[in-house]
Every structure is written in C-alpha cells, then in structure tokens.
C-alpha cells in the first residue's frame, strides 16, 4: 500500500518497522472482525491518521524482493 498507492498519492519507501503502523491501520479498517475496535477508535472513511515511519529500505535487496512479490 505504501509503495504502490492509489491515484496521485506519492509512493513511500518504508522499512519493516516503519510499515507496521500502516499494516495495523489497514487491518483495522479492512477486517470486518475488527469492526468493534474500529468503532471504539472512531475510525471511518473520513478519518485522518498520522503514521510515523522512521526508516526507509534498510535492506534494499530484500525491499525490492518484498515489493516485487506483493
């Protein structure tokens, strides 16, 4: 999702720990089993969420493989 965004959004190069927040948010928003948590957090399609990624592709070879396999 970060490396291949939709529309005109810019791609973000993020390492494993930096992408963890995005992965958690995606799971909360997309997994119906997490609907109660989503409601408790007050998240919906109009929400704005700040995710901080403090690292890039610290292992460029592995990063390219992960992105290619996605």
Image (tube, rainbow, N blue to C red):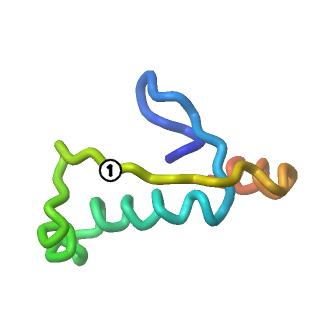
Residue 5 picture location, percent across and down: 49, 36
On the image, the x and y values in percent for residue 38 come to 20, 67
Give residue 30's position: percent from left, percent from top. 29, 61
Residue at x-position 84% and y-position 50%: 60
Q: Residue at x 46, y 28 (%)?
A: 9
Q: Of 66 and 26, which appears nearest the observer?
A: 26
Instruction: Tell me which corner region of the image, top left, top right, bottom left or bottom right, holds residue 8.
Output: top left
Left or right of residue 50, residue 13 in this image: right
Q: Residue at x 71, y 56 (%)?
A: 66
Vertical arrangement, residue 3 with respect to residue 57, above or below: above
Residue at 20 percent of width and 75 percent of height:
37
Q: Is residue 33 above or below residue 57?
A: below
Q: Residue furthest top?
A: 8
SS of the residue under disc 1? loop
According to the image, label 1 marks what residue? 49
Find residue 44 and report its horizontal and vertical position in percent: 17, 53
Q: Is residue 27 left or right of residue 44?
A: right
């Amino acid at each position: 999702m970060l490396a291949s965004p939709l529309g005109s959004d810019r791609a973000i190069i993020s390492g494993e720990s930096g992408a963890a927040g995005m992965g958690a948010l995606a799971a909360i928003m997309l997994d119906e089993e997490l609907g109660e948590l989503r409601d408790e957090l007050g998240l919906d399609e109009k929400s704005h969420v700040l995710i901080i990624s403090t690292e890039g592709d610290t292992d460029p070879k592995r990063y390219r493989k992960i992105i290619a396999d996605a």
